[in-house]
Amino acid sequence: RGAVVTGAGRAFCVGGDLADIAGDGNDFANKIRMMRETSQILSKLVEMNKPMVSAINGPAAGIGLALGLLADISVVNENANLSDGHLRIGLAAGDHAVLIWPLLCSLAKAKRYLMTGDKITGREAERIGLVSDAVAPDQVLPRALEYASTLAIRVPLAVELTKRALNHWLRQAMPAFEASLGYEMVTAFDPAQSQAMTGGVK
């Protein structure tokens, strides 16, 4: 009747492997594959009927952070670093950022963090509304399981349809998400992007 997702190690999920991204070069076919896969992942998260709680136990970035933020309830380690990170490596913010950040924490805060690429702590993420709860590291999974238990005792159809109705906000934002994903792939072919990957652009 519910799902809890968490990281198996120190991190929650830090997204794509930078070595793979750097080694990808101008591989057009691979960029198209990545774009389609990312779109499928995000769409499936939005359309998932079962309620999901994320236990963001450590660092989360990129598509990994998308998984955490697109959960119905998100519980984060108050000391964890969260980051979209695309701007730091010369890419337009794609993945999930344009889809979910403005809805959660306001357009002003979304622009502040997405356009600078700055990291944010779990504590600050809760303060601006990006996550549901920020708790001490040892309380992340217990709190997430507590929420999942509450969801599990509710009438399943009522939970499912409440989630479905709320997720219409995300469905309305899908065109903006798809544009941002396309822009991310375009910026991958910018010569300045490869310089950013190697620290040439700040």
Image (spheres, grey):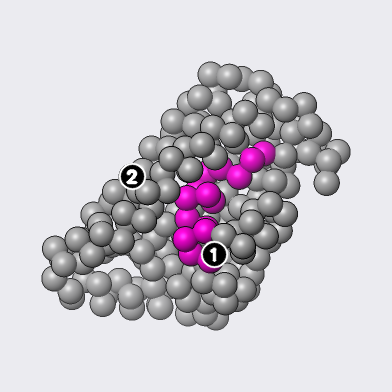
Counting from the top left corner in percent of width and height, residue 79 is at 63, 73
Question: Where, by quadrant of the figure, is residue 19 drawn?
Answer: top right
Counting from the top left corner in percent of width and height, residue 75 is at 46, 71
Q: Is residue 93 magenta?
A: yes
- Extreme residue toward the right, this view: 200
Question: Which mark, residue 106?
Answer: 1
Above or below: residue 17 compared with residue 74: above
Above or below: residue 191 compared with residue 129: above
* Direction from residue 117 to residue 135 in the image, left or right: left
| Residue 137 appears in the rendering | no
Q: Is residue 162 magenta?
A: no
Q: CA distance from mark 1 to mark 2?
A: 24 Å
Q: Which residues are magenta?
A: 91-105
Counting from the top left corner in percent of width and height, residue 35 is at 49, 32
What kind of element bears circle 2?
helix
Q: Residue at x 54, y 40 (%)?
A: 180
Q: Residue at x 72, y 27 (%)?
A: 190
- Front residue of 102/189: it is 102
* Direction from residue 21 to residue 98 in the image, left or right: left
Q: Residues within 10 Å of mark 1 (few under 14, many from 20)?
A: some
Question: Which mark, residue 174?
Answer: none
Q: Residues within 10 Å of mark 2 (few under 14, many from 20)?
A: few
Q: Principal SS element in the magenta part?
A: helix
Question: Where, by quadrant of the figure, is residue 71 drawn?
Answer: bottom left
- Front residue of 149/185: it is 185
What kind of element bears circle 1?
loop
Dot 2 corresponds to which residue?
44
Q: Residue at x 64, y 26 (%)?
A: 24
- Disc on the earlier residue, 1 or 2: 2
Amino acid residing under circle 2: Lys
Q: Residue at x 31, y 54 (%)?
A: 168
Counting from the top left corner in percent of width and height, residue 152 is at 21, 71
